[in-house]
Image (cartoon, rainbow, N blue to C red):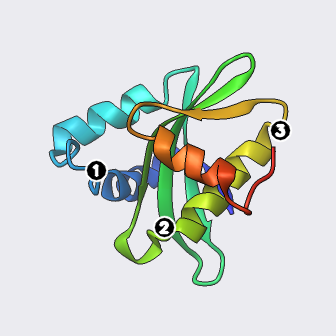
Amino acid sequence: MLVNYRKDYQKIVMGLLSFIPDLDEYDRLDEEIEWGTEPPRRIVLWKNTKIDQFGGVAIIESGADYILIRRMSFTPSERSGRNMYLFLSAIAEQESDKRVIGTLKTQSLVTNWRHSNQYDN
């Protein structure tokens, strides 16, 4: 389930983003969250409804005809291809008229998701 970021989720988002190697310091995490909430960017969380816990986070940027996946991170226990693909599909369904694309770091995940059976575009 896709959940939009709220200020009271800040510690959860910091924890999830800290799994990204270049975001291992508190000040850097704080900057990333601030940057991620400035339009046209936003932060969305992935909630595992079976255990009612957040397991992933993404910083996305919306353009006129695209959704750019800037950052994506999961807890180790939720870091499966299935969960990543479900998260990307939920993002794509939210704005179905836009194409999901990735940065240099996220494009391989987006490409694999696009070619999987999880999503048809």
Residue highlighted by disc 2: 55
Left or right: 63 in relation to 23 = right
Earlier sequence position, callout 1 versus callout 2: 1
- Per the model, the C-alpha gap separating discs 2 and 3 is 23 Å
Marker disc for residue 36: none
Q: Out of 73 and 99, give the one closest to the viewer.
A: 99
Residue at 37% in and 57% down: 16
Mark 1 and mark 2 in contact? Answer it, CB < 8 Å: no
- Of badges 1 and 2, the one in the foreground is 1
**Is disc 1 surrounded by few (<14), some (14 to 19) or many (20+) residues within 10 Å?**
some
Q: Is residue 14 left or right of residue 111?
A: left
Q: Residue at x 49, y 38 (%)?
A: 107
Please tell me which residue lies in front, 108 or 20. 108
Mark 3 closeness class: few <14, some 14–19, many ≥20 residues within 10 Å: some
- The residue under the point 67% across, 52% down is 115
Type of amino acid under label 3? Ser
Q: Position of residue 100 (x, y in %)?
A: 66, 36
Task: Tell which residue pokes out farthest to the right in this image.
Answer: 97
For the residues labelled 1 and 2, the Cα–Cα distance comes to 14 Å
Residue 1, position in %: x, y? Answer: 69, 63
Residue at the image position 27 percent from the left and 41 percent from the top: 29
Give the numbered dot on residue 20.
Answer: 1
Amino acid type at mark 2: Gly
Q: Position of residue 62 (x, y in %)?
A: 64, 25
Q: Amino acid at mark 1?
A: Ile
Secondary structure beneath label 3? loop
Q: Tell me the distance, in whole angstroms, between the alpha carbons under discs 3 and 1.
A: 28 Å
Residue 73 in sight: yes
